[in-house]
Every structure is written in C-alpha cells, then in structure tokens.
Image (tube, rainbow, N blue to C red):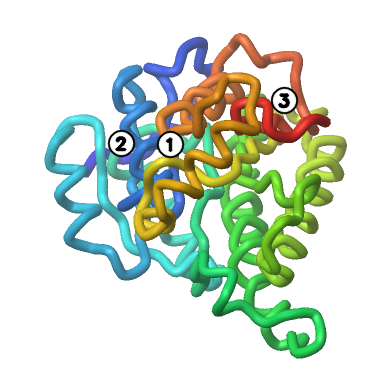
Amino acid sequence: MKEAQHVNQTPTSLAEQLVIVTGAARGLGAAISRAFLGQGAKVVINYNTSREAAEALAAEYPAQALAAQADIRDPEAVATLIRTSADHFGQPVTTVVNNALVDFVFNGDARSKADEISYAELAGQFEGSVKGPLNVIQAARASMAEMGFGRIINIGTNLFQHPVVPYHDYTAAKAALLSLTRTFADDLGPSGITVNMVSGGLLQTTDASAATPQEVFDGIAAGTPLRKVTTPEQLADAVLFFASDWARGVTGQNLIVDGGLVKG
C-alpha cells in the first residue's frame, strides 16, 4: 500500500477525487460507486456484511476501487476506514457519500404504525442514519479542511414531503440528517467543505424495491411529469453533480430526484 501524502492540492475533477461510499456493495450504493468509477475517481466500496458483493464490484476496477468493511455506527471502525482508504490510494479522502441504511426493510405492512411504534425503533434508525454519517463526516473532516476542499453528500428521502407509507422511524431519522446537512454546511463551509443531500423515492430497481409489484411502479410513474420511475443511475447522476466542480457554489441543499413527483 502507498503511504498517504497529505498535500494542500485541491482536486479539480472527479477523476482526481478519492470517494468513500457507505453501504456501497448493492443497490443504490453500487450505482453511485459505478458512477464515480466511470468518471475515473478512486472509490472505496464500504460494506458491513455484503463482503462478496463489495469485492466483486471492486474486482471490476482493480486500479480504482477498494472494498473495505466497517460498521458506520462504530466511530473507531470509521476512523480506521478513513486511514486505510488514504493509505491505500496515497491521497486524502476528498468525498464521502453517506448512503448506508442499517437494519431496515422497505415493507409498509411490516412497519410499526403510529399507535405502536417505540422510541427504540426510532433510536435504531438514528444510529444508522444520523450517528453513522456523523462518524464518517467527523473522521474525514480534518484532511478535507487541510486541503481546503471536501464534498459530503447525504442520501435522503422524498418521504419528508410525501409521507405515503408508515416508515416513521426511517423518515424521522432522514429528516434529522437533512437538518444536520444544513447546519454542517454552515459550520464546515469556511473550510471549503460543501454538504448537500440527494433525496429519492421508490427506485426501479434496487434490492429494496425488487419485490414491488409492477402496478405500484406504474402508479408512481403516472403521477410524475416524466411518466417514469427514477432509476438508481439517475439518482447517482445527481450525487456526481454535488461532488463535481459544477456544484462548487452549492451547499446546504436537498435535491429531490424522483421524476418531479414531489415539489419543493
């Protein structure tokens, strides 16, 4: 492995960036990883339990990708992840995408309704969707500040504006992450670090939505101006935008990518 060289050189293109995508082995995370890899970036494919899928993806890009295990809820594991990534590629981490979703199943019939949900369920989602990103951001912040450059992109949901399924714990945790996105944008902005969120709805298709009946997809498509359901690749395009120099003047924003289903 190369020894990390922490130099004050600002990356000017996606191809110069070192990106960590959490929960990157499958579904949306894999699509985001492929999008960065396609632009020539170096990508750390973080996983918790999906080792085989992460290593298979990394093997497709042996010079650019590294599969790395870490439970994002563990701050020591995350600190090790940041160090290992920088050492392996010989440069500091420039960009993090907080995509990992911990212990959640997208099945409205199986989720607790308002009269039965416990705070423990809410707290469990806060561990993954708030504590996890907090750990990653704090571990990567120092080297980003040293460079005067950093891109933090959090993955949210359009359920803030369109709460049509009882994912109370998931939606509350992602709402808290949106608040963190905006307050951290102000706090980290003077160091040259931008913090933004990309929020999607039901995507066609990921592991989470694979069991969704086609009539549900058709109904969602009919309600959008584009008459289409968003794909993971389309959402990944928006993540690339926030990481790119095209978004150098944008921070603290939440971009909804759902074909126009939700406004605002």
Question: Based on the displayed image, in which of its 4 quarters is residue 124 positioned?
Answer: bottom right
Closest to the camera, between mark 1 and mark 3, is 1
Residue 85 x %, y %: 36, 46
Measured Cα–Cα span from mark 1 to mark 3: 28 Å
Look at the numbered discs 1 and 3 and tell me whether their residues touch, using CB distance below 8 Å.
no
Q: Nearer the viewer, mark 2 or mark 1?
A: 1
- Mark 3: amino acid: Gly
Whole-percent x, y for residue 16 in the image:
40, 19
Q: Position of residue 33 (x, y in %)?
A: 36, 37
Q: Amino acid at mark 1?
A: Pro
Residue in the picture at 55% in, 48% down: 98
Viewer-proximal residue, 108 or 223?
223
Q: Residues within 10 Å of mark 3 (few under 14, many from 20)?
A: some
Which residue in the protein does label 3 denote?
192
- Looking at the image, residue 101 sits to the left or right of residue 255; the answer is left
| Residue at the (51%, 61%) spot, across then down | 101
Q: Position of residue 247 (x, y in %)?
A: 66, 15
Question: In the image shown, does 104 or 15 lie closer to the viewer?
Answer: 104
Q: Point out the image quarter for the N terminus.
A: top left
Q: Which mark is residue 232?
A: 1
Q: Nearer the viewer, residue 22 or 13?
A: 22
Q: Which residue is mark 2?
A: 89
Work out whether 114 lies above or below 126.
below
Label disc, if present, on residue 251 of the rendered structure: none
Up-down relation of residue 237 to residue 71 (above or below) = above
First in sequence: mark 2 vs mark 1: 2
